[in-house]
């Protein structure tokens, strides 16, 4: 069932949030990736994570869902601002420090949050993500099929719900990987919900134009909180090599591979993911963290 909703307001920004579980338990903030709202953290996943002993908060990034949305084509914010959004949510919920779990771009935002606001972060988990400061041409490139597919977004009629849903379903299919056991019905339901809930579905693509983070580049080794890197070995967007590079740069980082996964949060992997996050949280408590 959906979590308890709340709009967080700070400055001229509004962020739609929902929470699951016991608010007295250690807090986990879920941070989703580019173009994706909080719906990409499914209710059942949030409930499972809450059931492992955490108060789980998810939210819509700017330009997605019910959060502040600007015109398509030019984001008026940076990835640094999105890291500050996470802290504003913690402030609104009265959370001193939280376990950050970010997927894809969300994992990069979480890295910045851990660097900019170290006292607010207990542990960090990056799923299907990469170093926020790396653009190495020697790393395997994104699947050309996805790049070719995204060319259509420029001519897509964003008022046509069916066309946009079909476009998104195909995006999900490619992201899951060429050998994926793809659940089209699940993907279609998510795409429809995303479209119906968004203030402006096209604005989510502003995430592809984000800048920022330059002043923190090369400083990932300064992250002192426990880091868990979770990554699919068949990820067609950010190859598994990105996961290795992220884990290598942060002392003591753990790396969990999902052998059958692409760039996705597949239900078959939820048990392992939840268990990994819970173990990281519990180890932090034993080592003197705040929960």
Image: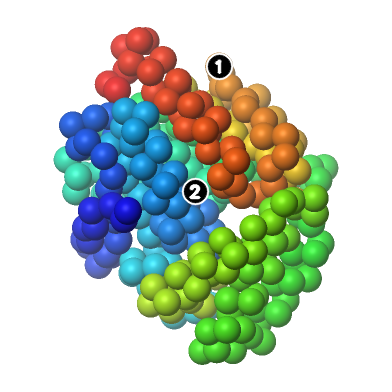
Q: Residue at x 42, y 77 (%)?
A: 196
Label 2, residues with CA under 10 Å away: few <14, some 14-19, many ≥20 = many
Colour scheme shown: rainbow
Q: Residue at x 63, y 32 (%)?
A: 246
Q: Is residue 287 above or below residue 189?
A: above
Work out which quarter of the rendered image holds the C terminus and state it.
top left
Q: Quadrant of residue 123?
A: top left
Label 1, residues with CA under 10 Å away: few <14, some 14-19, many ≥20 = few
Residue 98: x and y, percent?
32, 33
Residue underneath mark 2 = 106
Total number of numbered labels? 2
User: Label 2 to label 1, Cα distance in Å?
Assistant: 21 Å
Residue 140: x and y, percent?
81, 46
Residue 19: x and y, percent?
27, 48
What label does residue 252 carry, if any?
A: 1
> Is residue 53 toward the left or the right of residue 259 in the image?
left
């Amino acid at each position: 069932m959906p979590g308890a909703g709340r709009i967080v307001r700070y400055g001229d920004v509004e962020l739609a949030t929902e929470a699951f579980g016991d608010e007295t338990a250690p807090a986990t903030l879920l941070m989703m990736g580019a173009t994706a709202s909080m719906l990409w953290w499914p209710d059942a996943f949030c409930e499972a994570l809450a059931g492992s002993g955490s108060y789980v908060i998810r939210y819509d990034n700017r330009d997605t869902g019910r959060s502040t949305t600007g015109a398509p084509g030019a984001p008026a914010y940076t990835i640094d601002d999105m890291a500050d959004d996470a802290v504003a949510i913690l402030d609104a919920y009265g959370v001193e420090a939280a376990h950050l779990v970010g997927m894809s771009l969300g994992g990069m935002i979480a890295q910045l949050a851990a660097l900019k606001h170290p006292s607010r972060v207990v542990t960090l988990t990056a799923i299907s993500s990469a170093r926020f400061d790396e653009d190495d041409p020697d790393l395997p490139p994104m699947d050309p099929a996805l790049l070719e597919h995204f060319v259509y977004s420029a001519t897509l009629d964003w008022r046509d719900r069916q066309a946009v849903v079909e476009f998104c379903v195909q995006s999900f299919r490619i992201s899951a990987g060429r050998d994926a056991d793809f659940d089209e019905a699940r993907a279609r339901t998510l795409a429809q919900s995303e479209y119906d809930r968004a203030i402006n579905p096209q604005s989510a693509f502003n995430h592809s134009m984000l800048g920022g983070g330059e002043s923190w580049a090369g400083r990932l080794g300064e992250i002192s909180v426990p880091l868990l890197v979770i990554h699919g070995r068949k990820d067609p967007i950010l190859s598994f090599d990105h996961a290795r590079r992220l884990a290598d740069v942060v002392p003591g980082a753990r790396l969990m591979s999902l052998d059958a996964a692409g760039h996705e949060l597949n239900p078959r992997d939820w048990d392992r993911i939840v268990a990994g996050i819970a173990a990281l949280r519990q180890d932090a408590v034993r080592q003197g963290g705040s929960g």
